[in-house]
Image (spheres, rainbow, N blue to C red):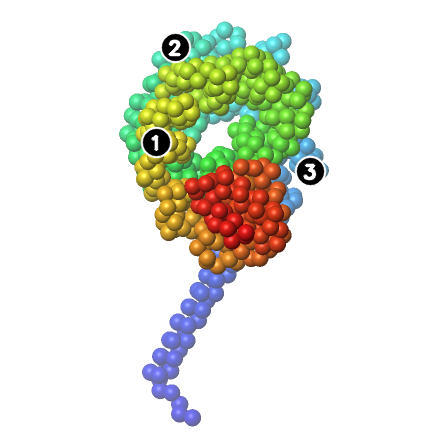
Amino acid sequence: MKTPTISTAFRIMATLSVSLVLGSSVGCHRDPNVQKQKYLESGKRYAKDAKYKEATIQFSNALKVDHNFAEAHYELAKAYMKTNSMMQAYAELTRTVDLQPTNATARIDLGNLLLAGGQQQRATDQANAVLALQSNNADAHALLSGVAAMKNDRATALTEIQKALTLDPGKASYHAALGLIQSSDPNSGGAAEEQLRKAVELDSKNATAHLVLAALLERKGDQAGAAEQLNSAIAQDPKNVQARGGLAGLLMRQNNNAKAEEVLKKAADDLPDSPEAVQMLRAFYAQTNQIDHAEPAYADLVARHPKSTQLKLIYARLLLAKRDIPKAKTVVAELVKSDANDPDVAVMNGMMLLSDSKKNEAFDVLQKAAKNNPGNIQVKIWLGRAATAKGDTATALQSFQDATRINPKNLEAQEGLAQTALAKGDFSLLGQVADAVIAIAPQASNPYVWRGISELAQKQEDKAEADFRQALKLNPKDGNASLELAQIQLAQKHLPQAKELLQQTLDSNPNSTRALRLLVSLDLYEKQPAKAVSRIQDQIAKSPQNSEMYDQLSEVQLATGNTAGSLASAEKAMQMNSSDGAAVAAYTRAQIASGDVGKAITSWQEWIKNHPNDAQANALVGSLEESRGNKDQATVYYKKALQIQPDQPIAANNLAYLMIESGQNADVALSLAQTARRALPNSTSTADTLAWAYYHKQSYFSARDLLEEALKMTPDSASMHYHLGMTYAKLGDKANASLHLKKAATLDPNGQNGKEAQQALTTLT
């Protein structure tokens, strides 16, 4: 082997040396213990500088290296608590305690979080676990005092906080807690004030002590002292929203609304990213009946803080309330562009899309938000509403149930669940929701109405009537209660009482088209059509923007022979609300009555342009085309309807009949006829079509039985008599064949069925 030269040896040694250094460096860099510790220390530095978002990222990085790193879980929990992300904080504290059962501080934090959530026993368990580890832990006694105070056990609360003070007399929060307990007893007001002043002396930033002391001083009549404490709390902790709200409240009680408004404007200006701070000003305007001042105030704040999501959210809601849709859309578009993943922005975007009738888009936005924010109750509620608008009752039900699980006392969620139960016809669920809401809000009238509807479905009329009357007792203007009660009176033939209740409904809710329809029906029943027309016109004067009332007017005018008036009313309804399908239907009936099917078709074609997925509209246009002899065009519309909705009964029935008549595939026609019959089992039209399909498949007995049964309901149908006569002919029963064919010829002497029946009779004889 050749001996290396000195220069070669030097290069080898140098290379080897570099390799060793690099190897050492890489090895250190890849050591998971070193790596996670670096992330932890970096996160702590960020947290110390109040950069909690960055701290959260670093602590999460540490946990990616070691998901059982207890210290990182605890630091992450503290960072979440600083940003009020309590659900995440709870999860991290629970994990910390699981990994480090002896971490007393984490247990105390977890206990306080549980106590804030009203879980008294679980908070007690954490305090007792700490005392088992450290019998003289002052924080554990303070936590037990808080549990007792929540239970209104004042004696135990005093005993436990005094134990905490004995162990640690220099802790301001203990003095504040003792002062708070003592302040609940007027006889110990002096002692409470002493403790609270001691707390402030020990820790001038203790906002709770300042706030409770301010309340105590105001109760004594020392308003100047109260204001001093609140101002001091704000000065010591400018981010304390409660102190600013407390000062505004004090000023309002002094009838100094102008100064209170100034304080709240400054709070929103100083803390534009705090949901609580920016919301207080809006609440103030509502409480002082100055809501018209809110929009310009928030417009100014948004101009000063164009990146504040919280300010823009409230501004958008105010614009929506004013129906300033164009400006609201602009603000929401800005929010979506900058904060699309914010759940509140998703809710606002969903609201805007729903108001624009963009149901599918709203649903998609809210469904995504719900997936990313499974614990957000407002997202769940609005997803439920979007699903309802879309007709997806299964998702609506699930969303509202999720919302009630998040907060069983949320009345919006419970109402959504009730409305979904009504839509599904699930009266058992409706009754359960009603009982739950009555337990939560016994003075609300809605749940008694829901329970009454549930009882009516179970034939418990007396109970239902009692609940409707209770609802009216609680709220005499509850239009739903008076309407339901009116319908009971109608069923009992108590017409004067029913009319009175229906009028009461309209007085409470001028837009109640259901109440108006029932009153109009009574007018027509009593042969007073002029009164019916006058009644609708009077109600339109009270609710001039309600297109459904013009729909009703069109129907009554058509029924009384006023075709021109009917057309005009239907056109007015369509102009007012392009999404009013009933208006187009009323217009169609009027055009058919006037003999102009073409205009009716044009109206529905325009409707389909704006509602391309409306299967029923396509089926209706098909029927209209068929009525004027355009069978090929009718077939196109029927097929389009079935592409959108494969079980659309009108399209399936009519297409099946056209296929049979034109000699097309009998098996396909039979399948379509069966689809239509399943959807409309009580329709004589679907019975006739299915029987005619059976006839062409040579299933004559099935055809006969179906037609015989259907003729009991519609004895004067020329089509069914003709089809039954032909069926009997195939069965060899000439007598019955002749009987039904003659009947068809008599009923429709100039029509196709009559002519074909007459021809069949000739063949038969």
Q: Position of residue 549 (x, y in %)?
A: 41, 23
In depth, the one of 125 and 529 nearer the eye is: 529
Judging from the image, what secondary structure is the residue with disc 2 in?
A: loop
Residue 261 drawn at (x, y percent)? 37, 17
Most distant residue in the top direction? 221
Q: The residue under label 3 is which amino acid type? A: Ala
- Label 1 is placed on what type of residue? Ser
Which residue sits at x=29%, y=25%? 300
Instruction: Please indicate, yes or no, whether residue 614 appears anywhere in the rendered image.
Output: no
**Disc 1 secondary structure class:** loop
Q: Nearer the viewer, residue 55 or 669?
A: 669
Mark closer to the chain start, 1 or 2:
2
C-alpha separation, residue under disc 1 versus residue under disc 2: 68 Å
Residue of label 1: 594
Secondary structure state at the residue bearing disc 3: helix
Q: Is residue 100 above or below residue 185?
A: below
Relative height, residue 612 to residue 3 (above, below):
above
- Residue position for label 2: 256
Q: Which residue is mark 3?
A: 129
Q: Which is closer to the viewer, label 1 or label 3?
A: 1
User: Whole-percent x and y of residue 678?
Assistant: 57, 46
